């Protein structure tokens, strides 16, 4: 009897002690959902930050490189999310259970550190994620290509077939005409009832007699020589000028998908562009940073991704076809233009982020280089190196301090 009473009391006491914790902890998760702003302005800011920094690796509703982020605020508390986004490696290294677990579940792909974000900024991204979780967008089926239009100007193969066909047909017509004319001429010569005058006329109108005419032959030879010379000169002018050149690449890699849709920074792949003469084409290992773990998505052409695997397994580089190619006699440095001159890639390469297939946008002639050097003012602000030069320049003239004024069109600057 007494023991039953005692048990009841213990249970009561236990419930009494535990209940505040239960209430508190359930309230905490409510409080967290409440903490996430629903203000349209903040959501828009989060949308922007997400597109620029996270979209490369995260979808809201499905796995990409990282896990789907829908409801992430329900399974993690906000301080954890701040810490993870700012520096996931640190959190994982500290042995945080949740961080280690999610890291292992995702093939140990390390997420980029975003230590430059403030808590408010991360909160705005979470607000955007919550907005997307509560109002999932209607999925629009579209491949990574987003369309089938492939830019480039490969001539249609039919064009050549039509051209050759036409020439053959014309030749045949000429032969037939010749046979008819000579048959008619023969017929007239054999007739007795035709006057000599008419016979002479028939012989004269034989068009092929023209070929025995020296003046006519002279003119024809002259015309042909001129045509050949013109074609020759034209082809000389266009040596090295390959504007619009857009060769087919061994892997259907798309700048539109990577740089346009997913906004991957050009430097991520073209690592040399701010440091050296060459921009560098990425090795297959760089592709694998992402493609070893992209498991879902539209993945229409897994055969294309297989080619990257093949290159790595066989230890062979992918044989990308070079698009831009200056002759050896000219010296061009990316670092000079991108890091020092602060020019955007697009100034010279056009809207690469819209191209399915890279094409040569500028003509890359000497005139192109020099025109820009004449017109472009040097960006000297904040660069101590230029202060003295600008001062000297301003004493002499009040023309703007262009690349040309700094000696940018001297032959030796571009020719060894
Ligand atoms: C380079 C790819 C990459 C980028 C960019 C990236 N993430 Fe991640 N993220 C991951 C991976 C991979 C994981 C899984 C954890 C791991 O492997 O470390 C992850 C995990 C997370 C988690 C934990 C998810 C969970 O279920 O616990 C959050 C939250 C997160 N990311 C938010 C962000 C935000 C916000 C951004 C943009 C500011 C961002 N990530 C950008 C790759 C990325
Ligand atoms: C994910 C990696 C990646 C990113 C990001 C990337 N590229 Fe590329 N880029 C490549 C690869 C691979 C090639 C070679 C295949 C080709 O030409 O399509 C290439 C080729 C090029 C070429 C032509 C090179 C030649 O052969 O002359 C230019 C120009 C270029 N990229 C500019 C850019 C610019 C500008 C950006 C940023 C808007 C950018 N790339 C972002 C991977 C990348
Ligand atoms: C920072 C991450 C990242 C890097 C680096 C990267 N990709 Fe991608 N790639 C993606 C994403 C995201 C998609 C779109 C996936 C989707 O929509 O299914 C994609 C799509 C593709 C596709 C079309 C999808 C398919 O299945 O056919 C090809 C081909 C491709 N990438 C090739 C490359 C090559 C080649 C490189 C290296 C030069 C590279 N990628 C580097 C993220 C990356
Ligand atoms: C001032 C014009 C200019 C700017 C700005 C510029 N490029 Fe180039 N780029 C060129 C020229 C010219 C070539 C051909 C170089 C050669 O053949 O030696 C080239 C070639 C390339 C190539 C082929 C590989 C190589 O290094 O020759 C890649 C990739 C490339 N550029 C990427 C970029 C990226 C990415 C940016 C922006 C960060 C950029 N370029 C900015 C003019 C420019
Ligand atoms: C869109 C404009 C633009 C084009 C096109 C361009 N350049 Fe330049 N170039 C600049 C600017 C701006 C600078 C100055 C960078 C600085 O030092 O601040 C520069 C500087 C240089 C320099 C260094 C000059 C010096 O005084 O030290 C060389 C060499 C050069 N360019 C070569 C070339 C060649 C070769 C081409 C053509 C293949 C070319 N540039 C095309 C804008 C351009
Ligand atoms: C801003 C850079 C730049 C400067 C300055 C420059 N060049 Fe050039 N030059 C080039 C480039 C780039 C080419 C290659 C053009 C091509 O392939 O169409 C070239 C080509 C040439 C050629 C080869 C002819 C041809 O059309 O292929 C000669 C010769 C030449 N330059 C002479 C000169 C002389 C002389 C000067 C000084 C008055 C000079 N260059 C100054 C960039 C420059």
Image (cartoon, rainbow, N blue to C red):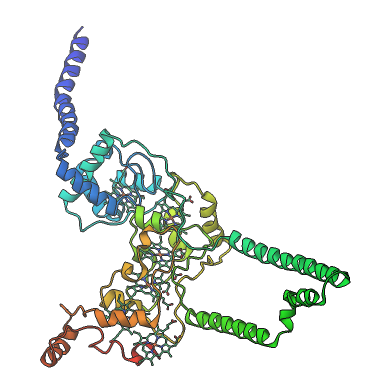
What residue lies at 42% left-to-right and 71% top-to-bottom?
Answer: 280
Left or right: where 108 falls relative to 217: left
| Residue 235 horizontal/vertical position (percent) | 52, 79
Which residue, as the protein is rendered here, is positioned at the far top?
A: 1
What residue lies at 26% left-to-right and 77% top-to-bottom?
Answer: 341
Left or right: where 327 falls relative to 218: left
Give the vertical position of 326 relative to 260 (above or below).
below
Residue sitting nearer the eye, 291 or 209: 209
Left or right: where 197 falls relative to 26: right
Left or right: where 167 falls relative to 67: right
Residue sitting nearer the eye, 104 or 375: 375
Task: Tell me if residue 40 can be seen.
Answer: yes
| Residue 171 horizontal/vertical position (percent) | 71, 68
What residue lies at 46% left-to-right and 66% top-to-bottom?
Answer: 283
Residue sitting nearer the eye, 391 or 360: 360
| Residue 163 horizontal/vertical position (percent) | 62, 64
* Quadrant of residue 255 within the rendered picture: bottom left
| Residue 52 horizontal/vertical position (percent) | 28, 54
What residue lies at 30% left-to-right and 55% top-to-bottom?
Answer: 89
Give the vertical position of 90 relative to 394 (above or below).
above
Which residue, as the protein is rendered here, is positioned at the far left?
A: 395
Task: Tell me if residue 91 can be seen.
Answer: no
Q: For ligand 3, which image quadrant applies?
A: bottom left
Q: Quadrant of the N terminus?
A: top left
Q: Quadrant of the C terminus?
A: bottom left
* Quadrant of residue 222 within the rendered picture: bottom right
Residue sitting nearer the eye, 274 or 79: 274
């Amino acid at each position: 009897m007494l023991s039953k009473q005692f048990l009841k009391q213990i249970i009561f006491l236990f419930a009494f002690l535990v209940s505040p914790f239960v209430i508190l902890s359930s309230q905490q998760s409510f409080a967290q959902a409440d903490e996430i702003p629903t203000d349209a302005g903040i959501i828009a800011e989060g949308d922007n930050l997400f597109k620029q920094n996270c979209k490369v690796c995260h979808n809201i509703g499905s796995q990409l490189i990282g896990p789907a982020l829908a409801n992430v605020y329900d399974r993690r508390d906000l301080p954890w999310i701040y810490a993870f986004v700012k520096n996931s490696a640190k959190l994982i290294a500290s042995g945080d259970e949740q961080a280690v677990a999610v890291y292992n579940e995702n093939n140990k792909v390390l997420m980029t550190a975003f230590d430059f974000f403030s808590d408010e900024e991360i909160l705005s991204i979470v607000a955007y994620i919550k907005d997307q979780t509560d109002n999932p967008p209607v999925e629009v089926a579209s491949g990574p290509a987003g369309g089938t239009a492939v830019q480039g100007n490969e001539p249609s193969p039919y064009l050549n077939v039509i051209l050759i066909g036409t020439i053959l047909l014309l030749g045949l017509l000429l032969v037939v005409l010749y046979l008819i004319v000579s048959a008619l001429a023969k017929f007239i010569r054999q007739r007795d009832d035709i006057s000599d005058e008419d016979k002479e006329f028939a012989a004269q109108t034989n068009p092929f007699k023209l070929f025995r005419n020296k003046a006519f032959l002279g003119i024809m030879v002259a015309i042909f020589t001129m045509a050949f010379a013109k074609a020759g000169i034209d082809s000389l002018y266009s040596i090295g000028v390959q504007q619009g050149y857009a060769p087919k690449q061994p892997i259907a890699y798309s700048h539109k998908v990577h740089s346009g849709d997913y906004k991957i920074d050009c430097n991520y792949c073209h690592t040399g562009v701010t440091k050296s003469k060459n921009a560098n084409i990425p090795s297959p290992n760089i592709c694998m940073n992402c493609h070893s773990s992209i498991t879902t998505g539209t993945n229409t052409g897994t055969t294309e991704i297989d080619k990257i695997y093949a290159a790595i397994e066989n230890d062979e580089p992918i044989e990308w076809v070079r698009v831009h190619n200056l002759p050896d006699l000219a010296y061009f440095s990316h670092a000079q233009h991108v890091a020092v001159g602060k020019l955007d890639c697009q100034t010279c390469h056009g809207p690469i982020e819209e191209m399915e297939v890279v094409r040569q946008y500028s003509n890359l002639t000497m005139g192109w280089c020099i025109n820009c050097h004449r017109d472009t003012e040097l960006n000297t602000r904040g660069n101590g190196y230029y202060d003295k030069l600008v001062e000297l320049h301003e004493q002499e003239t009040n023309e703007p301090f262009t690349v040309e004024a700094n000696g940018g069109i001297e032959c030796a600057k571009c020719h060894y």
